[in-house]
Image (cartoon, grey):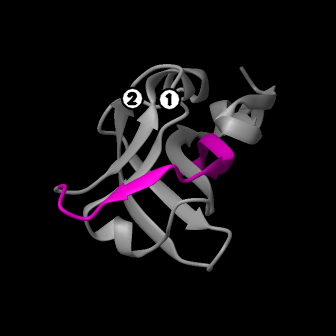
């Protein structure tokens, strides 16, 4: 039996821009992706704390240290600059690994700088 558990979470990420003409995805500053354990093109689930929208897409790396969180393609219609997102992804684990599992979580503050982290 496999269990679906939270692998990574970026909490309170502030949207820095949007590009409706891009093919899709969410641009995330590469250093934030690395700290959260997200790979380029990895599937993510996002929830917008400002309007309640939830959407699934994939992560693409942005400029390291830039704090970029950019809604691309159709996702650009689900939020706006300044909105706060929770960005999550999940993994499948067997029962023995699931019992000991702890996700990587980073909490962001002003300028999308890390203010708290756990599970790293």
- Among the two numbered marks 1 and 2 on one chain, the one whose residue lies closer to the N terminus: 1
Instruction: Name the quarter where the C terminus is drawn.
Output: top right
Q: Is residue 77 above or below residue 81?
A: below
Image-quadrant location for residue 18 = bottom left
Image location of residue 48, percent across then percent down? 59, 68
Image-quadrant location for residue 94 = top right
**Residue 1 visible in the shown view:** no
Give the number of the disc on residue 90.
none
The residue drawn where x is 67% and y is 37% is 111
Residue tagged 1: 33
* Residue 3 in magenta stretch: yes
Q: Is residue 100 above or below residue 74?
A: above
Image location of residue 10, percent across then percent down? 64, 42
**Residue 100 visible in the shown view:** yes
Q: Nearer the viewer, mark 1 or mark 2?
A: 1
SS class of the residue under badge 1? Answer: helix
Tell me: 68 left or right of 40. Answer: right
User: What's the distance in space between the residues labelled 1 and 2, CA to CA?
Assistant: 7 Å
Give the number of the disc on residue 39.
2
Tell me: 60 left or right of 81. Answer: left
The residue drawn where x is 65% and y is 37% is 112
Give the magenta-colored segment's residue range.
Answer: 1-22
Q: Main secondary structure of the magenta part?
A: strand
Tell me: 37 left or right of 76. Answer: right
The residue drawn where x is 42% and y is 49% is 70
* Residue 16 in magenta stretch: yes
The residue drawn where x is 56% and y is 28% is 32
Front residue of 102 and 84: 84
Q: Is residue 36 above or below residue 70?
A: above
Mark 1 neighbour density, 10 Å: few (under 14) some (14–19) many (20 or more):
many
Contact check, label 1 and label 2, Cβ < 8 Å = yes
């Amino acid at each position: 039996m496999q269990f679906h558990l939270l692998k990574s979470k970026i909490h309170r990420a502030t949207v820095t821009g949007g590009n409706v003409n891009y093919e899709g995805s969410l641009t995330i500053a590469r250093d934030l992706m690395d700290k959260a354990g997200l790979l380029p093109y990895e599937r993510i689930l996002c929830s917008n704390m400002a309007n309640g929208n939830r959407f699934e897409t994939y992560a693409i790396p942005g400029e390291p240290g830039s704090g970029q969180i950019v809604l691309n393609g159709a996702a650009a219609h689900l939020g706006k600059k300044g909105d706060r997102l929770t960005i999550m992804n999940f993994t499948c684990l067997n029962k023995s690994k699931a019992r000991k599992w702890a996700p990587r979580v980073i909490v962001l503050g002003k300028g999308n700088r890390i203010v708290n982290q756990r599970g790293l």
